[in-house]
Image (cartoon, rainbow, N blue to C red):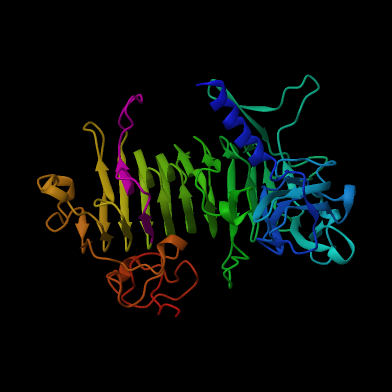
């Protein structure tokens, strides 16, 4: 390229650049617009940081402007922190002379870490505002956060920097034993509804002790946390019937992320683990949400685990994973699991009555119910399945076959389904000759089975498994297996409906 052409292009560039300057701005005049006039940071626990929330600020004028100040109303003492287009300002509280081009916008990101004592005593709200400019040009965006006080349970930290661990086989995991004489929390084996609990790591019920959960207790588990019931230890979950959608008397186990965006996210925490040798465990009116495995029940000591009026939702692996266990379930509802909603494996003895097992996980590998008498690689590989009995139940979901029976010879495999609605489509007739799936002719294992009919649940995505009179499960139960009240306390009529809910007209 000749020197003359180069000089020509340089001249054009200089002409364009001289037309304006990035620093030719005018002061803002209070005409900013915002994506929201109030930012609700939802609920956080005392002294636990919130998620990050976003505010968009618009300059819809024709002028490039300078905003003299963007700051938090409570200044440097505010419990909120903000960043403005990536800038941190003074301690994340005060920003001066922020430029904003014409017809452009900027982002403000907001977080908070506050104590319950910082909040209003009457409503536990902590509030502040983001102030733009001052005087007659002042504009505000309100900030609101609900601060919940809680009891925090976590492994001890020792002087050498290590933390308390629990022995699991040949391994150790972050965890601690619950102490009935803890100097800070008092009796950690008595969980009450006075405050929610937040658990870090695995909390273990020591041998020969019982952890009791009173009605209305709320337990929140951090990531990689859960509850372990040791050999000869027990849990008694004593939830009772609630009268509102708030489930005020239910015992609820869930993660510690309280924002609405996390309300249905699977795998936020570990599991409730009833270990080999745990004893006399009872669960009533319990809701488990967003675990990896909702209930892991292994080789209990021969006593029956009683699971009644219990709901388990959005488990990334299993809703219930039982291995050589003994369970009696009544009015149980399990929905959405990455692998299996209810897995009764490695033998055992199981009975479920008036229960609803559904799985709409987005995978062709998921099923609602798995029954087996073996684990590959275990010693021995197979154990006796002395009973797997399902009475007046619904087994359904989005996959073509929502039930899987798998067995190995050399161990007992006893199962029976009575008056159940089962989704088993037998695509391509691959199970036609399989003796374990002869629903219409094998009366030793199947009685009054309804195949591939829609139960017409009220709202699966909201975990509402109520049915009405149009359901294929309506009045198809056997009164010989009747549980008099459904999971929400409604009296069952005769003949009873299948599943955990007595039919009622859906709300309009």
Dividing the picture into quarters, in which one does residue 357 lie? bottom left
Q: Is residue 289 above or below residue 161?
A: below
The outermost residue toward the front is 4
Q: Is residue 234 above or below residue 499?
A: above
Check residue 117 for magenta coloring.
Answer: no
At 70% from the left edge and 59% from the top edge, which residue is drawn?
Answer: 39
Dividing the picture into quarters, in which one does residue 14 lie? top right
For this rendering, which residue is in front, 100 or 338? 100
**Residue 160 at x, y = what percent?**
78, 19
For this rendering, which residue is in front, 257 or 368? 257
At 47% from the left edge and 50% from the top edge, which residue is drawn?
Answer: 314
Q: Is residue 203 above or below residue 254?
A: above
Which region shows up in magenta? Answer: 355-382
Check residue 357 for magenta coloring.
Answer: yes
The quarter of the rendered structure image containing the C terminus is bottom left
Q: Is residue 414 visible?
A: no
**Residue 323 at x, y = what percent?**
40, 38
Dividing the picture into quarters, in which one does residue 199 lie? top right
At 14% from the left edge and 58% from the top edge, which residue is drawn?
Answer: 440
Lateral position of residue 491 relative to residue 135, left or right: left
**Residue 237 at x, y = what percent?**
59, 54
Secondary structure predominantly adopted by residues drawn in magenta? loop
């Amino acid at each position: 390229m000749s020197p003359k052409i180069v000089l020509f292009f340089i001249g054009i560039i200089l002409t364009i650049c001289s037309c304006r300057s990035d620093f030719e701005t005018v002061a803002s005049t209070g005409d900013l617009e915002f994506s929201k006039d109030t930012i609700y940071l939802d609920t956080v626990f005392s002294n636990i940081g919130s998620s990050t929330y976003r505010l968009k600020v618009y300059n819809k004028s024709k002028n490039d402007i300078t905003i003299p100040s963007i700051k938090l109303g409570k200044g440097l003492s505010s419990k909120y922190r903000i960043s403005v287009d990536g800038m941190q300002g003074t301690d994340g509280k005060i920003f001066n002379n922020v430029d904003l081009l014409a017809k452009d916008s900027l982002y403000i990101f907001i977080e908070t870490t506050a104590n319950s004592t910082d909040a209003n005593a009457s409503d536990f709200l902590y509030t502040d505002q983001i102030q733009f400019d001052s005087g007659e040009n002042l504009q505000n965006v309100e900030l609101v956060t609900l601060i919940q006080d809680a009891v925090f349970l976590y492994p001890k930290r020792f002087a050498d920097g290590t933390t308390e661990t629990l022995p699991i086989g040949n391994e150790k995991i972050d965890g601690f034993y619950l102490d009935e004489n803890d100097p800070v929390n008092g009796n950690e084996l008595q969980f009450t509804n006075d405050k929610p609990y937040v658990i870090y790591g695995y909390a273990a019920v020591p041998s020969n002790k019982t952890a009791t959960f009173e009605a209305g207790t709320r337990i929140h588990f951090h990531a990689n946390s859960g509850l372990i019931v040791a050999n000869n230890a027990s849990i008694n979950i004593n939830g009772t019937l609630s009268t509102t959608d708030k489930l005020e008397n239910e015992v609820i186990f869930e993660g510690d992320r309280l924002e609405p965006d996390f309300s249905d996210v699977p795998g936020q925490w570990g599991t409730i683990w009833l270990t080999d040798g745990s004893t006399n465990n009872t669960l009533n009116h319990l809701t488990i949400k967003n675990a990896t495995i909702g209930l892991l029940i292994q080789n209990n000591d021969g006593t029956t685990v009683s699971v009644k009026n219990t709901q388990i939702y959005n488990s990334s692996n299993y809703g219930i994973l039982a291995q050589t266990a003994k369970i009696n379930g009544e009015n149980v509802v399990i929905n959405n699991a990455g692998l299996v909603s209810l897995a009764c494996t490695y033998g055992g003895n199981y009975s479920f009555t008036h229960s609803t097992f559904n799985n709409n996980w987005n995978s062709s590998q998921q099923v609602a119910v798995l029954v087996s008498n073996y684990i590959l690689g275990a010693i021995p590989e197979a154990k006796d399945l002395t009973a797997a009995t399902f009475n007046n139940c619904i087994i359904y979901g989005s996959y073509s076959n929502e039930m899987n029976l798998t067995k190995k010879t050399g161990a007992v495999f006893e199962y029976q389904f009575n008056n159940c609605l089962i989704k088993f489509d037998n695509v391509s007739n691959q199970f036609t000759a399989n003796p374990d799936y002869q629903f219409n002719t094998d009366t030793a294992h199947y009685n009054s089975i309804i195949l591939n009919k829609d139960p017409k649940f009220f709202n699966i995505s909201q975990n509402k498994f109520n049915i009405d009179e149009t359901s294929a499960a309506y009045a198809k139960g056997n009164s010989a297996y009747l549980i008099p009240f459904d999971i929400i306390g409604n009296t069952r009529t005769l003949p009873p409906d299948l599943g955990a809910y007595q039919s009622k007209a859906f709300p309009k």
